[in-house]
Amino acid sequence: MACPRQVKPEMPRKALDEGIGGVVKAEVRIKGGHVQEVRILSGPRVYHSTVRAAVMRYECQSTGDAEVLATQEFVFRIE
């Protein structure tokens, strides 16, 4: 499964203001080329909604109607 259109999560203002960086791990359920569900497995809570919103906008290529589970990590750095 490939998702050629991936949307980068935005850096939440609260994370910048408070200097919170980290890694968010998400489990993504894809069916028919469309993201059906995003489950956050770990990472700072301040990033959960922005990661979920970005991944829901992914467009994936599918070879059928099979359901695929994938995990992806997002790294947020405060510089």
Image (spheres, rainbow, N blue to C red):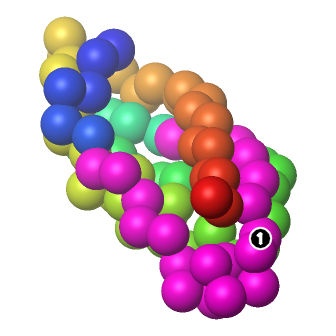
Please state which of residues 13 and 47 is positioned toward the viewer in this rendering: 13
**SS of the residue at dot 1?**
loop
Disc 1 designates what residue?
20
Q: Is residue 66 magenta?
A: no
Q: What amino acid type is highlighted by mark number 1? A: Ile
User: Magenta residues, as a range?
Assistant: 7-28
Please state which of residues 71 and 30 is positioned toward the viewer in this rendering: 71
Q: Is residue 15 magenta?
A: yes
Q: Is residue 56 above or below residue 6?
A: below
Whether residue 27 appears in this view of the structure is no
Q: Quadrant of the C terminus?
A: bottom right
Q: Is residue 32 above or below residue 10?
A: above
Splitting the image into 4 quarters, where does residue 46 fall?
Answer: bottom right
The crowding category of the residue bearing disc 1, from other C-alpha atoms within 10 Å (few below 14, some 14 to 19, many at least 20), is some
For the point 28% across and 50% down, the residue is 7
Q: Is residue 69 above or below residue 53?
A: above
Left or right placement of residue 51 versus residue 45 in this view: left
For the point 26% across and 56% down, the residue is 57
The location of residue 23, given as percent across then percent down, is 73, 47
Left or right placement of residue 71 versus residue 42 in this view: left
For the point 55% across and 27% down, the residue is 70
Please state which of residues 67 and 60 is positioned toward the viewer in this rendering: 60
The location of residue 38, given as percent across then percent down, is 53, 54
The location of residue 68, given as percent across then percent down, is 46, 24
Left or right placement of residue 72 versus residue 33 in this view: right
